[in-house]
Amino acid sequence: MKYFILIVAIFFIGCGGEPNITDADLDGNVLFDPSLYSPEQFLISKSKPNPTEEEKQKPVIIVAHGYTATTFEWNEFKRYVDSTRADVLVSQVLLGGHGRTYQEFKNSSWRDWQSSITDEYQQLVQAGYRNISLAGSSTGGPLIVNLFAQSFFKNSIEPKHVFLIDPIIVPSNKSLSMIGIFGPMLGYIESGDMTAEERKHWYAFRPQETLQELQDIITITRKDLESGIRFPNSTHVSIYKSLYDDVVDRVSAVMLYNGIETQTPDMKKVTLPHSGIHVITRLEGRAKVTEQDRILQKNVFDEMIQDLKSKQ
Amino acid sequence: MIYFILLFSLLFSVANAKDEQLSIGFRLQQSIHMYNENGFTLEFTPKNLLNDQLSFGATYVSSRFGSAINSNAILQDNFVLHSTYVFSKSSFSPLIRLNTGYCFADYESALFDDIDASMPLLSLEAGARYTFDIPLKIQAGLGYNLITSDGSSGIGTVYPLFVQCTLLWSFSL
């Protein structure tokens, strides 16, 4: 019913103007993702372009954030890996069009978003890394899964493990499915409650063009999953999907689990924690975090590290 | 409440049938950005009720006969009671329809037992009907599901907008 009211409101009010972006917003021309200034602090291909033979065998994981987010989304994982001396290399990619300005985001497509992941993967392979895994949170999930549907890894190094954290295939808010109809009238949608910290690291204003791109990539991935996506023989997959997430519908986990085909059934696993957080691995910047959230985050990090290290 | 009213109306009408019309047929339904679900429909038009322009019926559509054929799409079954009002008795007429029922999903694994596998359905449709010289009717319309999942409850694959096309063969009782 709330969607119906929303539609009526759109018809009568409309908006379509330019968003009111301040200098405190990532969307503006002041704040940018730090990986744009210092890529060597985020990308392994930049910090270790000439690995030793030992480093080439080390697990390296490319972590991709979600729609409107930045490298910030995976900072806690990187810090945790470093603090536990896990001997895992973390490469934090900034999706194309993200972490820059509203206009650059507006002009980007989901293929631009995805290109950062493929660029880093190819550079790591070229540098000689052999033990590469991938992790995607939210929209990072379908962007990674789509690479398997495209057989991107066919003539390359097979990823060892894929981690999908609250991956989106079906949004919680089903009005996204009508963005093609009502988007042009809206122009953009402002995100709901965001903390001041979050406004520095996430776009607060979502251009309707990018919402249509989001709808496109999740529809393509859903259809690919319905046909079945065969993962390479040595690739494992772990899906984590919180049960009470207001951004991504939990049925996304069902579609991914049933649609991804691994060499053996035990190479894929799904975990459905009783959490209301979207992207359970990112707690920093949130208005409210419980002890249970911290325990869950730590458990997921530990499982990821264990899975990465078990494939050395 | 709506279920009871529609069910009572349907049963009452059938029980008192005389010179009434019964139609059976196929329904093809496509949710915008989600599944194609097809199935069967039954419609009963009582005599002299709103000038023969109001009918009651029941429909079963499922992804089993649509998106889930030879695919990993989620199996979901929709059982719906409905009432349709056509605006005129001419061969071509606009119509409105109220649907209410239940949707059941089968996730095919105990791993997903924590996810709701059923939810109520309530939708409105607007469209048109064309009646041929033979006892064949074709209906097409655009529907809107008033109840959808919020991501934490219900079935996530019930989407707001859908289009449908129904072919009905009529019999006089």
Image: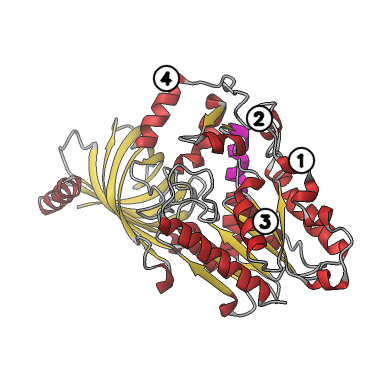
Label 4: which residue? Answer: A12
In whole angstroms, how far apart are the C-alphas of marks 1 and 4?
41 Å
Task: Give how far apart the Cα atoms at labels 4 and 3 are.
Answer: 42 Å
Question: Which residue carries the number 1 mark?
Answer: A36
Foreground disc of the pair 2, 1: 1
Q: Label 3: which residue?
A: A63
Classify 10 Å Cα crowding around label 3: few (below 14), some (14-19), many (20 and above). many
Q: Separation of disc 2 and disc 1 at Cα?
A: 16 Å
- Asked whether A39 or B6 is in front, the reply is A39
Cα gap from disc 3 to disc 1, whole angstroms: 16 Å
Which residue type carries mark 2? Tyr
Q: Tell whether A307 sits left or right of A111.
A: left
Q: Tell me if I can see residue A134 in this picture.
A: yes
Q: Which element is circle 1 on?
A: helix
Judged by depth in the image, the label closer to the viewer, 4 or 3, is 3
The residue at the point 33 percent across, 41 percent down is B146
Label 1 resides on the chain identified as A
- Which residue is labeled 2 in the image? A102
Residue type highlighted by circle 3: Val
Foreground tag (4 vs 2): 2
Residues marked 2 and 1, same chain: yes
Q: Which residues are magenta?
A: A208-217
Residue A210 horizontal side relative to residue A2, left or right: right
